[in-house]
């Protein structure tokens, strides 16, 4: 009886120790299932553009990613807008985060509230509001790259501020005080102490901004004019049947993001 009870106890302990990990792995598998399907379909040789079944393996899609007319132009435009929006939103958002965390001024609480509004507002509301702003300002005839860029910086800004603020809030101010005690001036303290400590948050905000910009459809569709970004191209191609090269672009973007994250993690461990 003692042996049986001990065996049951060990089994129960093993289940208790591995239950959370098992649930976590199942959740990750559920989350990554659509990505696995996209990767699989990037090697598909479809019998029809309307069907979504795997009909045969081929490398043609990877060797000819620009075969669908206009798709690579749309990808290039999305990358250009994404990079420009990331630079603009990251720069402005970082300055805003430092101002909101490090300084006390009249209207600071109101500024914090308004920072969250673009994140909480539905995209259709923000997109239509920006369209109304551009039309009222007389830009109705020039909707395109620049109006999309302004719109993307607008909604990426909030995510940058929140991300960098969280990093700044967890920063120990005694580290900067110690640098100043060692005769470092304000610029040296910022460059050698503050910026390296905050940089992971800035990088995370930049990656998030690029992902949001590259992926956006609703706001872009309302303010794009004749410009066609990659999400808009996918939406238009869906009316006629999605070409398998779209899955190639999706897989490539996922691999680039994965490599970037892994490289950052390896660099952090090497520095540690």
Image (spheres, rainbow, N blue to C red):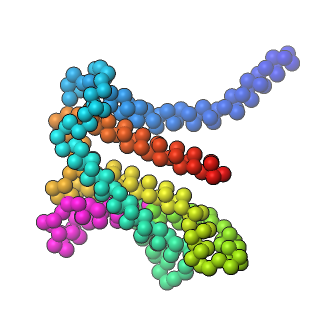
Q: Residue 103's image quarter?
A: bottom right
Quadrant of image for the N terminus: top right
Q: Give how far across and how far down residue 44 sits, in percent.
A: 30, 26
Residue at the spot 37% in from the left edge and 32% down from the top edge: 39
Residue 187 on the magenta span: no
* Relative vertical location of residue 242 with respect to residue 257 in this rendering, above or below: above
Identify which residue, 237 or 197, lies in the foreground: 197
* Relative vertical location of residue 95 with respect to residue 16 in this rendering, above or below: below
57 sits left or right of 49 in the view: right
- The answer to whether one can see residue 118 in this image is no
Residue 133 on the magenta span: yes
* Relative vertical location of residue 171 with respect to residue 209 in this rendering, above or below: below
Residue at the spot 45% in from the left edge and 62% down from the top edge: 160
- Which stretch appears magenta? 130-159
- The answer to whether one can see residue 104 in this image is yes
Identify which residue, 69 or 137, lies in the foreground: 69
Q: Give how far across and how far down residue 129 sits, in percent.
A: 26, 66
């Amino acid at each position: 009886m003692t042996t049986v009870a001990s065996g049951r106890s060990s089994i129960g302990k093993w289940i208790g120790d591995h239950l959370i990990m098992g649930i976590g792995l199942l959740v990750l598998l559920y989350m990554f299932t659509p990505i696995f399907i996209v990767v699989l379909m990037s090697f598909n040789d479809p019998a029809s553009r309307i069907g979504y079944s795997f009909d045969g393996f081929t490398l043609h899609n990877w060797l000819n990613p620009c075969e669908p007319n206009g798709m690579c132009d749309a990808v290039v435009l999305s990358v250009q807008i994404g990079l420009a929006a990331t630079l603009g939103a990251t720069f402005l958002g970082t300055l805003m985060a430092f101002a909101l965390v490090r300084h006390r001024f009249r209207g600071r609480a109101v500024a914090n509230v308004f920072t969250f509004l673009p994140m909480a507002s539905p995209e259709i509301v923000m997109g239509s509001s920006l369209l109304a702003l551009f039309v009222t300002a007389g830009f109705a005839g020039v909707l395109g790259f620049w109006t999309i860029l302004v719109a993307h910086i607008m909604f990426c800004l909030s995510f940058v501020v929140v991300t960098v603020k969280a990093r700044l809030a967890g920063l120990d101010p005694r580290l900067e005080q110690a640098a100043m005690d060692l005769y470092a001036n304000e610029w040296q303290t910022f460059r050698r102490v503050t910026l390296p400590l905050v940089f992971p948050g800035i990088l995370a905000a930049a990656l998030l901004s690029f992902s949001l910009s590259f992926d956006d459809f609703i706001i872009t569709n309302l303010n794009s004019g004749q410009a066609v970004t990659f999400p808009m191209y996918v939406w238009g191609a869906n009316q006629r049947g999605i070409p398998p090269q779209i899955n190639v672009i999706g897989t490539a973007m996922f691999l680039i993001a994965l490599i970037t994250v892994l490289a950052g993690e390896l660099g952090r461990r090497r520095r540690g």
